[in-house]
Each structure stands twice: as structure tokens, then as C-alpha cells.
Image: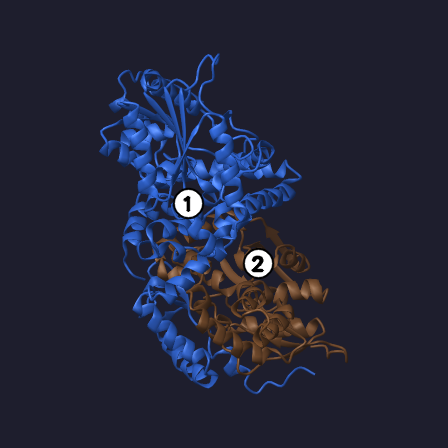
Chain colours: A brown, B blue
Amino acid sequence: MSSAAADAPRVGLFVTCLVDSIRPSIGFAAIALLEAAGCRVDIPRRQTCCGQPALNSGDRDGAASIAQHTIALLEPYDHVVVPSGSCAATIRVHYPELFEPGTAWHARAVSVANRTYELLSYLSDIRRWVPEGVGMAAIATYHDSCSGLRELGIEAQPRRLLAGVAGLSLRKLEGSDTCCGFGGTFCVKYPAISNAIVEEKAAHIEAAGADILLGGDLGCLMNMAGKLHRQGSRVRAYHAAEVLAGMAGGPAIGG
Amino acid sequence: MTTTAFTVRADRALADPQLKLAIERTTGTARTKRAAAVAAWPEFAAARMLGKDIKDHVIAHLGHYLAEFERNALASGAKVHWARNAREACDIVVSICRDAGARSVTRAKSMLGEEIGLPHALADAGIERVETDLAEHIIQLAGDPPSHIVWPALHKTREQVGELFRAHHRDPGAMATVEAMVASARRHLRGRFMAADVGISGANFLIADSGAVCTVTNEGNAELTTTPPRVHIVTAGIEKLVPSTAHAMSLLRLLVRSATGAELTQYTTFHRGPKRAGDPDGPSEFHIVLVDNGRTRMLTDGLADMLRCLRCGACLNHCVVFRQIGGHAYGGTYPGPMGAVLTPVLDGLPLSQDLPRACTLNGQCQEVCPVAIPLPTLLRGWRDRSWREGLEPVSVRGFLGIWRFLVLHPALYRLATAAALPAMRLFGRGGWIGWMPLAGGWTRHRDLPQPSGRSFMAQTRNRKPSA
């Protein structure tokens, strides 16, 4: 990859627990894209999970202690980049809410929050990066994950980036802004309701007539891809970063 | 994954294809029409903020506007009653009915009436209740509670309504069309409108500077409920106050577009006081029952935002959970996102703890709310309280406790990941896991992608920062 200029931002990549465990290739795609966009990328070694399961279960103290752990390891960087809208929103929107305004931890949370970005919006809005020489001959459709869409305003950026991939055509997904039923712990706490929601989503994906499903959040993609596979669908799912980095040649999510 | 009264009701709803059809027909139309109405109104975002400000202002000065409303209502000849809770409200209504010697009352749809349990209170008092809203008429015949705050009979398909009318109407005729069904209901109800001793309505707005009560309907049933009987009783939550008619009009524009996508309801009526000398019609007694029932407690419990709610139903129509399970599964008076916030206030958190949890926090409810209520934030507030009060199941607390310990100890977290990933891979076939211990909630309905190999952190252990 191109070596970064002297004024290149030092980016801490927070890869998320799901990418770490289930699909590291998204992390490698993120490194490649950030370097292509002129960033110096570092992977904070003590990172684990942003703490969403605690936050969304009402365990505020637990979430706050995880936030402190994460804030401390992200503080040294110019920017923090996360290949997930919901994990980025946890840091950017919810970390500051976990601390009393006026306290030192609140100030530290706000400082990290203001420097934290979701990967695709960071590439497009902050780095003004456009893909060059990337191609993929496929018909794709895109699902907007809710946290990224509504908490971070990510809607145009992934589409703008994907428009620069030669050979890739993007078809509209009916209800692309409607939740897929993942909802983090929701999908295992209320599996039957979650299933009914993702069944409807899978039907819309099939109706879009695309070969591949793209998105920016692995949790939602696993949910939708898992349902599509169970139903025998031929639609394959990738994180948009994998396509943009030219790394979607390998097996799709789940194979 | 635990079985609770809520999940049992939800499972029953999910197993009913007629219910799914009924919900999708109505909420689908509502979503389409609302989107069109909002798109055709360039000032929607500004109007929404104005609506929010109007409600916030009234809520911040509730005492002032309640006093002003009472003063002006009394001046109009109305009688004003105050009820701290549901029981007091029902007692007041029943005692007014008894004083009037009422045998039969007509009622125009009111969610507050449902909230305070008025139908049961009237039945217990031996007073015949005639529901005059078409959808309320349907569910009265079926013996069901409402399943939606705007369309109480949302859970019934038109085919099921046809059967119900054939069984209960005296002169059903052919039920071939919706128009024929409406005509049958009209024939069935018309005489009862005129025969009622008391008419009971709710209120969409209470106008402080005039003491008037505003109702909106599409059927004109509120007017027929409140005009012919000798006595008109209004039951209203204290949060329905607005300073003036102009403020009510600002909120009406938001309410109706958000509810049905129309610009205005067919009937928007301002009722003020009893019949005056020279008036050709109207009730000779006009009672207004102002109900608190937990609302002032919401002010101090961090739920003041919820008091802005106009009861438009947009959050229900756009909620992925409501659209799958319908209103009855929620088990309270109010379903959907707004119901998941309000039911713990009304029924207590222990009985309704599933409702704030059975939400994906996707935020679409807040996006469509015409007064910008931060519903996901309020639901998170209930989850926090649920955790603090120890209501979260022990299994969940235990799992999250172990998980949190690992998350805070990266070296152990890596070890756990390094052990778990190969174990998970043992259950995989062709990249997918169809079943795995402890993952039943996921794998019952969908496959789980097999971890592709070593973790990202393990693979990048010796990586140097990019130059």
C-alpha cells in the first residue's frame, strides 16, 4: 500500500469483537482501505468489545467500565475507525452518556467520541477517498444498518463509494432502511420475533434480484446471510469494505 | 431466551397468518400514506420541532395551564373533576351516570378510557355500553381489547369482520363490500345513539384559554355520542392540554398526517360547555374528568418526554416488532414503542419488563414520531432500571458477568477466543454452523457463519503500525 505522508493521521482501528472472531477479513480490508486513503493504521492491542451487550441490557456500570477500558486505549490516536455503524455509534454517541458531565471521564469520553468514525463514512466524508482500479462484476443490493443510518447519518457514503467499483451495479432493496431483526442480544432473547423480521428482510433481498448483499455491519449481515443460507438462497453476503478493498474474491460470509 | 407471558403471547401471534395479513394491510397503507403526506409538506421538520416545543412548554407549566383550563371550563358551564388514578376516574364516571339515572351510555373511542378500565367499570355498575367507533364496535362484538391506538380492530381482517357482523347484527344484509358492512353497522348503531342517556368521549386536546375540548374522528361518531344524550362526560389525561386553539391546530396537522396521512380528519370538533339557552341541541350536563394516573410521576421519573405523545400510532406502524406480533401480545393498554414506554408506568415494571427489551433499538419510531419523542432512549431507561432492580434473568446476568470480566481482561479474552473459535469450527460444515450448544436462539431459525480461522487480533499480533 502507499506509504503515508508526514501529516497522515494516525488511525486506531477498533475492529469489533464480531470481526475479530468471525470474519477477520473485514479487518484486513479496513487496514487496506485506510492505508489507501493515506492513513497510518495501528491496531490497539488491548481492544476487545465496545460493550454494547452490557449497554443494551441496562448494565450501565458494566458498560461504563468497558467504556473506560476502551477510551484509554483509543485516546492516543488522531482518529478511531470502526468497521461497524453500531459499534462506532456506541463509542461516539453512547460513551459520553455513561459519565456525569463535568467529570474527567466524561471529558475523555467526549474527546474520543468526537474522533471516532465508522469506516465507510470516514473514507468518504473525512478522507474524501474514492476507489480506484477496483472491480467486481456483480449485481448487489445494500442494507442500511439502523445505528449507522439513524445515529450516525450513514446512507449516501457507502453508495457513493460502491459506485466507484467497476462492474458492480447496485439495485434498490425495498425497505433497505428497515431493521433486519438482529438487534444484538435481541435476536437471542426473542428469537421467534427476530426470525419473523429477518424472514421478511430475506424475502425483500431475494426480490431485489441481486447476487450479493452488502452492508456495513457484520452483526446484521450475519443475521441476514444466516437466514438466506437456511432458506437455500444463492445470495451471498459481504461487508462493503471487502468489496471496496478488492477482497471479495474469497468466500462470502459463511462461505 | 426465556419463556414468559409475553413470549407466549408473541408466539401465538406469530403463528396466526390472518393476524399478519391484517396488520400488514393496515400498517402498510398507513406507512405509505404518511410518507406521502410528509413528503408533500416541506415544513414538516420545522412543524415537528414546533409541536415538540408546544408540548414541552405545557408540560413545564402544567399547573398553570390546568388552572387556566379549569377556570375557563367552569365559566362555560362545565363541571370539572380531578382523578388521581384509574379507580377514582372510573368512580367519578360511574357516579355521574348513576346520578343521571343512566341505563345506556354511548362511548366514542378513547384510549384513556381503555387505560382506566372504563368498559369494565361500566359493566360492573350494570350500565349498558355501546361503542360507537366502527372499529370499537367490531371489538366489542368480538369481546377483544383494542390492538392499536388508532385502529383498535387492526387485528381483524375485513373477512373476519364480515363474519362477526353476520353473527351479531339484526339486519346484516349482504356483506359483499366494505360499504355494505359499514351500512350494516350504521343500521345497528343508529337507534342506540339516540337512545343513550350519557355519551362518553375522550379528548385529543384540552384548550386552556377557552375551556374547550377537541375531538377528532373520521366517522362523526364522537358528535353523535356527545350531542343527543342529556349528559356528556369527557375523560382526558392531563397531558392533553394546549394553551390555545391555534396551538391545537399546529398539533392537529402533525397528528393527522402521522396517523393516517390525511391532512385533516373528517370531523374536528370543539366541545365547550353544556347546551346554552337558545341552542337547538347539545347536552344539558357537561363533565370533564381530568386524569393523572401516573402522569405527574412520569415528570419526575425521567419520562417527561413521553408526555408529548399525541397518540398518532406512527411508532406502532413503523415498528418491526409490532408489525410481527400485533398489539395484543404487548399485554397492556398501549402497544408498540409508545406502549413499551407507558405500560411499565401503568402496570409496573415487573409485569412488563419484556416490553422495553423486546426492541431492536433501531430508532425508526423516534424518526417518525411527530413530536420527536426519543423512544429508544426511554426504553433504554427502563432496561437500566430493570437491571438495577435485579429483574434481568439470572442466566443473562451470569452470562454478561463472565463476558464483562473477559472483555476487561484482554489476555484472558484472547485465550477464550483462541479456545472458542476452533471449538465452533468443529460444528461447522461448508462454512456454516447449523446447530451448536448455547447458540440455539440463533441456530433454531438461521445458520451461523463459521469463524473463518484464527481471530483478527491473533493474526495481527506481530504487525507493525503502517509507516
The numbered mark 2 sits on a residue in which chain?
Answer: A
For numbered disc 2, what is the local secondary structure? helix
B115 vs A223: above or below: above
* Residue situated furthest bottom in the rendering: B462
Callout 2: few (<14), some (14-19), or many (20+) C-alpha neighbours within 10 Å?
some
B248 vs B423: above or below: above
**Residue type, label 2:** Glu
Whether label 1 touches label 2, CB < 8 Å: no
Report whether B97 appears left or right of A100.
left
Callout 1: few (<14), some (14-19), or many (20+) C-alpha neighbours within 10 Å?
many
The verdict on a common chain for dots 1 and 2 is no
How far is the residue under mark 1 from the one under mark 2? 23 Å
**Residue type, label 1:** Arg
**Residue wearing tag 2:** A151
Q: Which mark is residue B323?
A: 1
**In x, y percent, where is residue A188?**
37, 62
- Is the N terminus of chain B in the top left, top right, bottom left or bottom right quadrant? bottom left
For numbered disc 1, what is the local secondary structure? helix
**Picture mark count:** 2
Report whether residue B361 is seen.
no
